[in-house]
Image (cartoon, rainbow, N blue to C red):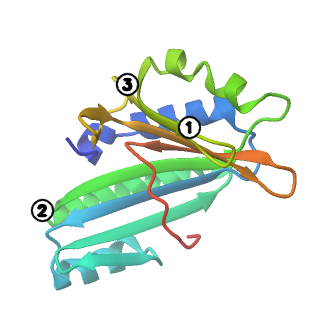
Amino acid sequence: MVLNLSSLGHKDVYLLSQLADEVMSNEERIYMASVCCEGANEEDILLLMNKIGTVNMERFDLRSIVFGYKTHGLECLTSFVSWIERAAAEVKALHLTGTWNIHIEGCMRKGETLHQLLAPIELYICADEVDSSSDEKEYNTHYYSGLFHGTRMIGDEYSNLQIMAKPALPDNQWRITLGTPSIIIEPYDVH
């Protein structure tokens, strides 16, 4: 199952944003979305570029394309959701299937340890841990929750939420990224 707008709606975006409220400070929060359109031809690509209006586009092969959108700040959540809706409508109008990834990045709330902040997540979103790895440089966990709609396979199990945290210089405060169904790290330009 892939994450598409008919299953995504506002729900997954707002649920991910609420989860971010639980673990991140409100400052410097970055919202990112990407949609991969399998089966897009050259004409589809040009139409999507013109209609969606994104600056960043990465082409994997002749039939798939990834468009990305990146915006800063809580006040931009409405424009972020509007971009996703507009992009999904354009993808659907071309009779393409879009596979979505949504993620939010920000700094950990101050005054708590990473494990104190992340401990209630399983209860908050009724999630089961699928896979996890951690060391002093990175914390990376995949979950499955019935509250999110898209899925991807991690080994033999389904996952639809990934949480990654890395210490950031100069103060070693953790940078946290939450993504559904996973986190795709791409160098998006700000739109």
Residue designated by label 2 = 95
Mark sitting on residue 17: 1
Residue designated by label 3 = 147
Q: Residue at x 23, y 65 (%)?
A: 37
The answer to whether the residue labelled 2 contacts the one labelled 1, judged by CB atoms less than 8 Å apart, is no
Q: Is residue 187 left or right of residue 130?
A: right
| Residue 67 image offset from top left, x and y in percent | 38, 69
Per the model, the C-alpha gap separating discs 1 and 3 is 13 Å
Report the amino acid beneath label 2: His
| Residue 100 image offset from top left, x and y in percent | 33, 52
Indicate the quadrant containing the N terminus: top left, top right, bottom left or bottom right: top left
126, above or below 100, in the image:
above
100, above or below 131, in the image:
below
Report the amino acid beneath label 3: Leu
In this view, the residue in front, 73 or 152, is 152
Q: Is residue 156 left or right of residue 180?
A: left
User: Crowding at label 1, few (<14), some or many (≥20) Cα neighbours within 10 Å?
Assistant: some
Q: Is residue 55 left or right of residue 86?
A: right
Per the model, the C-alpha gap separating discs 2 and 3 is 27 Å
N-terminal of the two: label 1 or label 3?
1
Report the amino acid beneath label 1: Ser
User: Crowding at label 2, few (<14), some or many (≥20) Cα neighbours within 10 Å?
Assistant: few
Mark sitting on residue 81: none
For the question of whether residue 83 can be seen, the reply is no
Can you tell which quarter of the image residue 136 is in?
A: top right
